[in-house]
Image: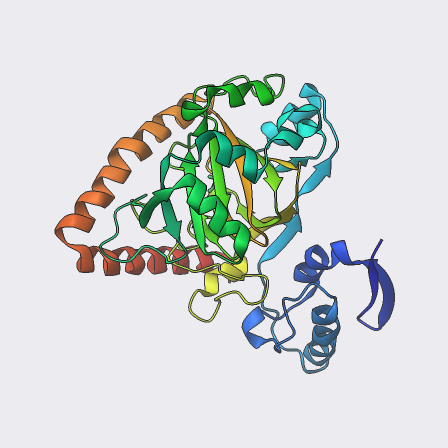
Amino acid sequence: MVSREVSLKGVTQRRPNSELLSVSPFLLPFPPHLSTGNAHTYNGLRVECFNSLNLISEIVSLPTIPIMQIKEIDRIESITPEAFRRDYYEPRKPLIITGLSKKWAASDKWTWDYFKSIVGDKTVGVYNNTRAGAKVLVNGADDYIKFGDYLDMVQQGPVQLRIFLFNIFQHAPQLVDDFTFPDELIKTFLKKYPMLFVGGQGSVAHMHYDLDLSHIMHTQFIGRKKVLLMDNSQSELIYRMPCTVESSASFVKWYEKLETEHFPALNYAQAYTTTLEHGDTMWMPAGYWHHMEYIDPGFAMSLRGLDDTIGGKVNAVYHLLGLRGMNNLLIKVAPEWWYNYKRKVAKQRAEKAMSRFV
Ligand SMILES: O=C(O)CCC(=O)C(=O)O
């Protein structure tokens, strides 16, 4: 276990590195923008340098300012359906199941070369890292290229291009024999819609939640991906823009610096994090916000399950038909006005939500 010595309120302890991120936000009174350049690293230095600020704040009685609470997502090798339902599904809490995909043929069989050999000639939409501007329609691709050419490109070096919601299984139905739906955990899987996500090193899926509000089992096959998740109840604190599933704040490299100068309500939000690695399956409850950064080139598959509550289903229909339609219509007819209006309303709502804490 990799660990470092950390010094908190005069007490020095040795703590595993894996704990430092989850420990530090609860203990530190200062938000990231008051930090030194070493804050938001994973190496424990952040804890140490804030310790002196803690001490100063105690001596001169500075007010305590919260910072975003970020916890590591629970990890488990396997779980019974009863425990999953009780501890994760019902409370809507994310989980990483490390053993679920181990018995799948896909675990070893799905490689870059294998995908290229079976669907390399199909044309796919690719998405760059630029966040949607005033005139960009929801889910509009930035370019179209052959899947095989894209796979060659991402293996050669950092490429900030992603493939998003690719139904590779329509082109190569034999792939569905390489895995099994974990029906014992979720009973409502949409079996026709397993989806592939691919990204080059450095590519980013910006903070959003999924329009269809489905529960997701997201299995990472190749490469590591850094994830930040938040329950939908955090929407106002993270500047959700009206008629969208997007935040007006950027979370790019959030682990180095959060944009709290411009988006102070982020300090009051609660989040979960992990780094997904080969074989990890992440359970992400319906409506969860997610932001993902590709540390390495990699790919993952999402299995989607309908929310089994009536409210969830109605909300999904509203999101897919009403909300997306309205957003796209306003992007077409009044792009600049709508772009600014969405941001203004997100800010007003965040300030109101933040005022409940202060
Ligand atoms: O892994 C990715 O590229 C994005 C995943 C995602 O947004 C999703 O599963 O909804």
- The quadrant in which residue 219 appears is top right
Q: Nearer the viewer, residue 67 or 79?
A: 79
Horizontal placement of 258 versus 23: left or right?
Answer: left
Please report the residue visible at 61 percent of the width from the left and 55 percent of the height from the top: 69
Q: Residue at x 34, y 56 (%)?
A: 346
Would you place residue 159 above or below residue 289 in this image?
below
Q: Residue at x 39, y 24 (%)?
A: 313
- Determine the residue located farthest toward the left in the rendered image: 333
- Do we see residue 304 in this rendering? yes
Residue 233 visible in rendering: no
In the rendered image, the vertical position of residue 353 relative to residue 120, given as above or below = below
Q: Residue 283: x percent and y percent?
A: 59, 34
Q: Position of residue 212 (x, y in %)?
A: 39, 32
Q: Is residue 343 left or right of residue 7?
A: left
Residue 238 image position (x, y, % from top left): 45, 54
In the displayed structure image, the side of residue 288 where residue 100 appears, left or right: right
Which residue lies at the image location 41% right of the left edge and 23% below the top edge?
170
Colouring chosen for the image of the structure: rainbow
Left or right: where 16 falls relative to 235:
right
**Number of numbered markers:** 0
Q: Looking at the picture, how far across and down is residue 91, in whole percent?
A: 59, 32
